[in-house]
């Protein structure tokens, strides 16, 4: 079922491919190398068949029949001899080669078509420019405009395509246009005496005859130009008046020039990063996207217009699937269209194995983050989601809300029935609550019979309406308990999450206070939490924000912040990598010279939106140290530098980081940037782009605190990182908690499957080190391995470069 389970396999072939389960299962039992050996013929057959059976190759009855024959051959001939897979592989390779040739021919035809269209558009544009240079607004001679539309423009387009603008024919036609425009213009200005009219009439004869002959020769089916040419001859001889008609300018192609494109980009600052990515694309590049059924698809860039404002993409069959302007393509990139992720390059068998391990990790993560009875998220996970919502409010000025819900007189259920029945009621209530709260909302069980709902992008008024609907729906819904329909009511407290809100524990407490007020007022009602003075709270927030910025700037300017380096060591000796590794950590110097953790300072910087200042300082100080090591001809170790989620998605910080790398001349191969998982969870598209941009110039990346979020597996699938740091909470519980051990092992297996190295943080003792070696973790970090030390101390111990 490995191939059949793939979402992108043609539906018509899934049953036939599913029949391969039996021979593959037999093979796996007889040959243990099947799963481990990437080059095993049976594995290659599975991979190639899945590629052939991809839905992008269908409908194709002939291909469907050929694949069916290959599968039937394997099923009927397989015994204990794997030669049947070698024979099948030969047939598959020939079939694949045929498809590749067909795809190549399709792309070549498309390119020829697009190049032809581009030449035609260029010809029309340059012909229009030629006419516009002589027939200018607001009005021009009517006869010239009519002649242009009755065949002359088409003639010039043909001349442009066949002979070019350097040809004699093009020059003759351009000269004719110039002369006719000048003569008719002179007549409009009154320069129309008898001598001038006679001279014009004589000179016009060969010009008009030449135009007539060339239109007739190039386009024999064109009619209508003869009468216009005769009228021109009469007018130029002085026997007719020069009539004018309105003129409008415009390009036949309708394509914007480079200057107008750049102006449009400058008006769309959010797209600048993505327009730059568009400018970096070249033909042959693959991009992935989600179709309307949310299946992952891929497309290849086949053609780019000369002015780089039109991009044509094809599918695996070489058929056009997208025709996008530069701006539209930039928008698609900003919405998640991107180069293939690490997991996309896995073989089909590896994808199946990866999915199995991933499901184990998901299960363990679910158990850690959800309530065991109701399966809603638990108290701690809910607080984490509230923290993200609060950060969003602080960064974007958005408004969210929290509902705190308590089942009225729930203790009577346990008194009248029993605790088992009470648990059933809680479970049914949780299901009902999860169904009622809608999109952009998440429900949690806080404790006992108390629940909470986080509502995103809902100001107080809208949140209160949602709460009132939940209260009303629950009141009118009954639950069957031992044959009786029992109804319940709830009391709900509502509080807002605003830019100036305090910490999440206080916010949740405020919602709980409002819920208790609802109880006091008679239960079965919704009560809003009312702050004592909202304006004063907002004013105090702004004052604290201003003070935090001043304190932060003072600390940065007076060297209160210092960098320390903590070693990261290999878990096994003789692994072939002797490079020194350190993580740079921030310290805060007290007035007496002692060092403290800057945690409180950093929390304030995060809360009030100043982490960019901190990250810029850390980057510059780190690069200054590297530059000093190079000047002293010391060995430069691999350095891990922490970046906040705010910096990773900030366009200006990306530019700043590139400037600093250039200014200090640091070797990018020694740089590793650590991205905190929770900091980028709402900006995965930008985070992935940031990682790709700096990996392209040699930097490495790691995901910090991995495994603590609800969507950890998405990071491994989408971010092309080099290291995965297993969160310290799992490492600290490794010896005493089987679930933490299983979680650490599953993270390690997932990362290794994608070719990523793992780092265990918070390693404190030898027994933990032994377990981590047993799991197979690559690197260790923590006080049990090495404490953070000042850079001056580390500098003294670093060896000199070998001459």
Image: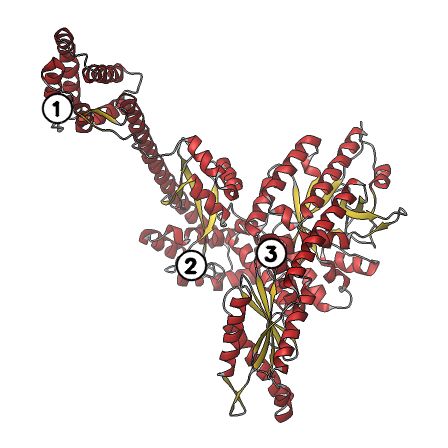
Q: Nearer the viewer, residue 62 or 397?
A: 397
Q: Horizontally, is 317 left or right of 746 in the view?
A: left
Are circles 3 and 2 on residues that touch, CB within 8 Å?
Answer: no
Please state the horizontal and vertical placement of residue 726, each as a whole percent of the image. 70, 56
Foreground: disc 3 or disc 2: 3
Q: Nearer the viewer, residue 401 or 310?
A: 401
* Crowding near the residue tagged with mark 2, few <14, some 14–19, many ≥20 C-alpha atoms within 10 Å: few
Please state the horizontal and vertical placement of residue 249, each as a whole percent of the image. 29, 30
| First along the sequence among labels 3 and 2 | 2
What label does residue 293 carry, if any? Answer: 2
Alpha carbon separation for disc pair 1 and 2: 58 Å
Task: Please name the residue that numbered disc 3 is placed on.
Answer: 392
Task: Please name the residue that numbered disc 1 is placed on.
Answer: 228
| First along the sequence among labels 1 and 3 | 1
Are circles 1 and 2 on residues that touch, CB within 8 Å?
Answer: no
- Per the image, label 1 sits on a secondary structure element best described as helix
């Amino acid at each position: 079922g490995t191939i059949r389970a793939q979402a992108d396999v043609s539906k018509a072939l899934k049953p036939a491919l599913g029949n391969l389960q039996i021979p593959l299962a037999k093979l796996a039992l007889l040959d243990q190398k099947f799963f481990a050996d990437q080059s095993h013929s049976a594995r290659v057959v599975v991979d190639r068949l899945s590629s052939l059976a991809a839905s992008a190759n269908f409908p194709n009855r002939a291909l469907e029949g050929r694949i069916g024959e290959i599968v039937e051959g394997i099923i009927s001939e397989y015994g204990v001899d794997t030669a049947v897979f070698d024979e099948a592989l030969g047939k598959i390779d020939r079939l694949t080669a045929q498809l590749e040739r067909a795809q190549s021919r399709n792309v070549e035809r498309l390119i020829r078509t697009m190049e032809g269209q581009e030449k035609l558009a260029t010809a029309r544009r340059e012909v229009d420019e030629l006419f516009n240079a002589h027939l200018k607004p607001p009005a021009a001679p009517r006869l010239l405009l009519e002649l242009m539309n009755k065949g002359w423009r088409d003639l010039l387009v043909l001349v442009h395509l066949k002979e070019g603008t350097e040809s004699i024919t093009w020059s003759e036609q351009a000269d004719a246009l110039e002369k006719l425009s000048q003569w008719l213009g002179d007549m409009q200005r009154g320069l129309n005496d008898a001598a001038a009219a006679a001279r014009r009439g004589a000179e016009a004869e060969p010009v008009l005859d030449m135009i007539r002959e060339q239109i007739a020769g190039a386009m024999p089916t064109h009619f209508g130009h003869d009468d216009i040419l005769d009228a021109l001859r009469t007018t130029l001889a002085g026997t007719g008046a020069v009539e004018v008609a309105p003129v409008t300018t415009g390009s036949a192609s309708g394509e914007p020039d480079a200057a107008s494109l750049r102006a449009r980009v400058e008006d769309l600052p959010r797209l600048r990063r993505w327009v730059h990515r568009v400018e970096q694309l070249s033909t042959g590049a693959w991009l992935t996207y989600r179709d309307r059924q949310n299946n992952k698809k891929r497309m290849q860039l086949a053609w780019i217009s000369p002015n780089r404002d039109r991009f044509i993409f094809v599918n695996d069959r070489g058929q056009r699937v997208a025709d996008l302007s530069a701006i539209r393509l930039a928008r698609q990139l900003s919405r998640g269209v991107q180069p293939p992720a690490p997991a996309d390059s896995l073989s089909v068998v590896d994808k199946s194995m990866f999915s199995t391990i991933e499901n184990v990790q998901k299960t363990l993560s679910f158990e850690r983050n959800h309530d065991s009875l109701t399966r809603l998220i638990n108290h701690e996970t809910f607080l984490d989601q509230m923290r993200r919502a609060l950060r969003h409010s602080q960064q974007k000025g958005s408004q969210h809300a929290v509902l705190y819900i308590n089942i009225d007189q729930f203790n009577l259920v346990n008194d009248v029935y029993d605790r088992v029945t009470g648990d059933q009621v809680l479970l049914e209530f949780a299901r009902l609550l999860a169904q009622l709260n809608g999109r952009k909302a998440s429900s949690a069980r806080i404790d006992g019979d108390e629940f909470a709902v986080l509502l995103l992008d809902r100001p107080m008024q809208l949140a209160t309406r949602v709460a009132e609907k939940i209260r009303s729906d629950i009141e009118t819904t009954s639950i069957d308990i031992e044959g009786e329909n029992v109804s319940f009511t709830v009391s709900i407290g509502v509080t807002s999450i605003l830019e100036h809100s305090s910490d999440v524990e206080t916010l949740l407490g405020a919602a709980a206070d409002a819920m208790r007020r609802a109880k006091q007022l008679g239960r079965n009602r919704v009560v809003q939490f009312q702050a004592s003075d909202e304006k004063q709270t907002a004013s105090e927030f702004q004052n604290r924000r201003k003070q935090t910025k001043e304190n932060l700037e003072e600390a940065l300017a007076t060297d209160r912040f210092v960098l320390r380096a903590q070693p990261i060591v290999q878990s096994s000796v003789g692994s072939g990598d002797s490079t020194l590794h350190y993580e740079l950590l921030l310290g805060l110097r007290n007035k007496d010279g002692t060092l403290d953790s800057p945690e409180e300072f950093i929390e304030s910087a995060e809360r009030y939106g100043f982490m960019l200042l901190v990250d810029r300082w850390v980057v510059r100080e780190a690069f200054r140290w590297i530059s000093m090591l190079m000047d002293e001809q010391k060995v430069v170790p691999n350095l891990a530098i922490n970046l906040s989620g705010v910096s990773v998605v900030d366009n200006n910080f990306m530019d700043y980081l590139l400037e600093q790398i250039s200014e200090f001349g640091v070797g990018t191969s020694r740089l590793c940037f650590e991205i905190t998982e929770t900091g980028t969870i709402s900006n995965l598209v930008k985070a992935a782009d940031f990682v790709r941009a700096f990996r392209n110039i040699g930097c490495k990346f790691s995901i910090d605190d991995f495994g603590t979020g609800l969507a950890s597996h998405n990071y491994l699938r989408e971010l092309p990182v080099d290291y995965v740091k297993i969160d310290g909470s799992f490492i600290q519980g490794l010896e005493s908690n089987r679930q933490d051990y299983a979680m650490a092992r599953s993270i390690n297996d997932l990362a290794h499957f994608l070719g990523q190295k793992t780092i265990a943080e918070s390693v404190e003792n030898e027994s933990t080190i032994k377990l981590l070696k047993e799991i197979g973790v690559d690197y260790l970090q923590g006080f049990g391995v090495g404490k953070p030390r000042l850079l001056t101390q580390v500098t003294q111990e670093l060896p000199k470069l070998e001459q």
